[in-house]
Image (cartoon, coloured by chain):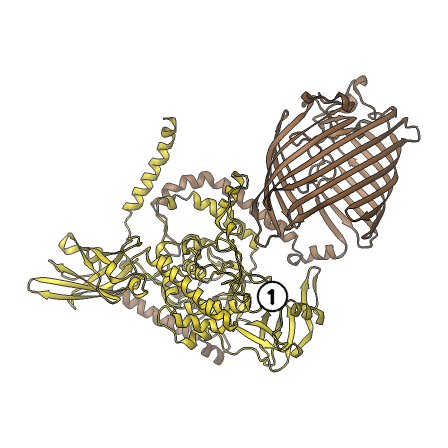
Chain colours: A yellow, B brown
Amino acid sequence: MMRRTKLRPLLGLLAVASAAHGCAKVSPVPLRPEPIAYDDTLPIVRPADRDPLEVERLLEVSVGGEIGRAFSMRRWLGADHEAINITRFDDVVNSAWFENRNGRRRLPLEAVARGSTTVGPDTSRTLTVIGGKTAGISPGFTVRDANGTSFLFKFDPRGNLHLASAAGVISNRLFWAAGYHTPEDFIVVFDSARLELDPQAEIEATEGERPMTAGDIQTVLEGTDPLPDGRFLAVASKYVPGRPIGPFLFSGIRADDPNDYYFHEHRRELRGLYVVSSWLNHVDMRFANTLDVYIDPPGYVRHYLIDFAATLGSGTIRSHRPREGTEYNFDLWSSVGRMLTFGFLEAGWEGEIAEEIHPAIGWIPVETFVPAKWKPNWPNSAFNNRTPRDNYWGAKLVGSFTDEQIAAVVREGQLPQEAEEPLIRILIQRRDKVVSYYFAQVTPVENVATRLRRRGAEALLEVSFDDLGLTAGVWEPAETRYYWAFDNPPSRRMQRGDEAARAGHRQTIRLALADLPGGGPAEDSQIAVLRLVAQRPGAQNREAVIYLHWDGAARGYSVVGLEH
Amino acid sequence: MRARAIRKALLAALLAIGTLVATPQARAQDNDNSGPVSPDSADVIRASLGRPPPKPPFDAVDAVALPFRIVLYPVRLLGYANVKLVGLVTRLSTPREYGLFQRIADAGFRPAFGSVGERSGFSAGLRFDRYLPLFLETAYSIRGSQRHVLGLDFNRPLYRVEASYLFQRDAEPHFWGVGPDSEEDQFVDYRWDRQIASALGTLRFPALELSGGFGYQDNRVSRGSDHKAADIQDLPQEDQPYGVDARTKYFVFDLTTTFDRTYNRLDFQRRGVYLQLGTLLFLGTDGTESDFVRVSGVLHSYVPLNVRQSFALRGLIEANRGWGEGVPFYHLARLGDKLGSRAYKEGRFRDRDMLALMTEWRYEVWRELHERGRVESFLFLDSGTVDHKFSEMRFRNLKWSWGFGFRVVWSGQTRWLAYLGFGEDGARLNVDFSWVY
């Protein structure tokens, strides 16, 4: 009884918050301002270089962030904020962060395979080693080719030739095609006799910077396997054009970049990045693997994802382990669980045996891969803020890749033939898992169009749309039925109905309208709302909301907004 | 709606101009920053853009949650301060971050933080060993304890020879009396200065070390620096143990055998057995009418159940037998903290003989992804006692401690340890930067 009395004020507050949230007056989507394409590419004064301390950030988000999330009232109420930089059709516009590529229009196979690359290093002439590699854990060095272009050469671990190089290049191409900015990464094969050490080359050792020696190069080369013909294989990462000014963070904004307007944790492209990362098993998605580059002229900051060596089955210097992708590096709640159970609590991954699929592929789960349970090595605020709509947006990117595109990209990794096919199959299976899981969380309709037909005094509104659940083959039309509710302000009544899906991905539902509006400005009262739910096995029955506006001149409805 | 669309179209056209300047083609043709849009005019454009807000607006849920956020703000502030502290330590230990720090290290100076003796409090020290075998150490603590060493250290794989002169001051150790029945709140303090000149040689064999040495020790006791506590000199004359008012000087002979079959599994789980047996002979000189011999033994045993869980045991035994005036109080066997029973302060119990058993159930809470270290939690149960003779020790006099704690193990060593222990003296929280087993 005492307990109940103590809880009462808290429950009351929650009820008030819930009610207040439910009753809050929010403008309908079509009346809200929209983000503007490339508005973050306007000229700015160059921001200062920055090098945030990773341990601070990781502690903040791994401990403070996780505790904050666990006790978040917003989360308890299911009132998470949607991403802020979304269009009226639940998408993002192109920007210095993201350019919708394959998701907007399917890229030709050669374009996907080429990615962002232009001209790779000239390995037929002298390659001058101009410095050691200081960042990251994979061995390597910086090389300038005969054309004067600089590249970072990184090598595979011994016993796992192609492991990190293939993973790096394949993921680089796929992230680029999805829409993110990536550097130019190439697989190169070179003769070590062409390497020449620049007398000015320096390397950072434990005792500080010192001149680089031939022995340092030899040490790097000894850490990898040569090809049968004695040459070496490496991934060559071209220095990004512009001036690097440090990584971007997954929360907040960069104060000295006036173009950096939307808070990162509320950016759709960063929230949705989780889904793409989960597909490619990019467990090392953290701010250290991002880069802001000042492009001058005209002088703006472009935001890159870099270093994809720890993706797919590669852990850069070894194969991935079952823990990666399943638990954060520092997983607060798993640690608390182990502490309270005296170490007897065992996570599922602990019993999993990670046998390499192939030395060139490493280990990447397929059967045990559950998209929603995938975790990067470190949490971040943008990923934590994801909503079903963000996940769906990310899944659309993943689902935009065809089997042929995936195969074309995997071939860019120059894997041994016996490793290529398994990896293609794995990526296709993981893609299908991602798509089917996240498409089930929403009603995945796109490209909505309307047509008004008149039958005497009655009008028939036909609303047609692409059902991506059918397009992707996740469901059959026979198992899909659409339920809708139409809130038409002039009629002041809610119409409801349902209709079975027909063959094909383009679907149409028909609404008989008793009243038609008279036109006028786009005010709340003039916006009709069609709520649509695709009911089918495994789907969560979350409605898609389609906003329609009566166009008096055209005597018809136009689609002015869409929420999933 | 139409007006908004027109405005947006105009802005889009303006932005298109800016975007055009951003294209690679434009970059190749023109390398200056004098495009149609300058940073200043861009500010004007940005200010005129009708965009969504940069973050979600304050809403009803935020309003209801606000009081909770205010109440919890100090906790957040504390967390923030801790994160910054970790950041500072990390920066200091990353030479690349601080050129000056790197130069100090390059010059042969190595900073050390921790403690320099019993109840020293936090200490900071510096070791200079650029010209090894010559080395110099100096350290001060916030309670005024000091430690200064000048020595020669020939450290080779098969042997080690060390000769040194040490001055050590423990500024305010406490003394609770002799025997197992001393009261917790009846302590006095003192200052113990000692100068030790010694030479020590060690022979190393696989799993075995033999070391022997000799030295000279000069001890003085004076009033402690803790003005809240009474000094040992204020005790009634008949309660004052030997060593309070007499300066002692000894020749010391040392013989120690160490058997070490411990190793680390995956760089963080200690396994195996460690045994050390030692004998120290103190011969009074220059007017010191006291000779005594100390025999001691330490046993560590680590029994793993699996790579995550293990059972660790530490046994301690010490006996002191003297002639003449006997054993000065500061050389009596001590029980408390890492010497026996963790819920008690260091040196809480003293007498000639000591027996203790420390046990720990260790289990992994977190392991670093690349398996370079981990955080362990542990439950412990310690017990021990002191007395004039082993034969007089009684079960009822055992000083029990139990509790739990955390240990950060990195590259095979305990880097940080904290525990909360409970015993007859109440609860005791301790934080340490190194640990004995």
Identity of the residue furthest to the left in this view: A456
**Quarter of the picture holding the C terminus of chain A:** bottom left
Residue B427 can be seen in this image? no
| Percent x, y of residue B17 | 39, 74
**From the viewer's perspective, is B194 left or right of A281?**
right
Q: Nearer the viewer, residue A532 or A292?
A: A532
User: Chain ID for label 1?
Assistant: A
Q: Quadrant of residue A83?
A: bottom left
Q: Quadrant of residue B325?
A: top right
Q: According to the image, label 1 marks what residue?
A: A159
| Percent x, y of residue B118 | 73, 34
Residue appearing at x 76%, y 56% in the figure: B107
Residue appearing at x 45%, y 45% in the figure: A68
Is A328 situated above or below A248? above
Residue appearing at x 60%, y 61% in the figure: A137
Residue type at numbered disc 1? Gly
User: Mark 1: which secondary structure?
Assistant: loop
Q: Quadrant of residue A388?
A: bottom left
Is B134 situated above or below A88? above
Residue A44 can be seen in this image? yes
**From the viewer's perspective, is B422 left or right of A336?**
right
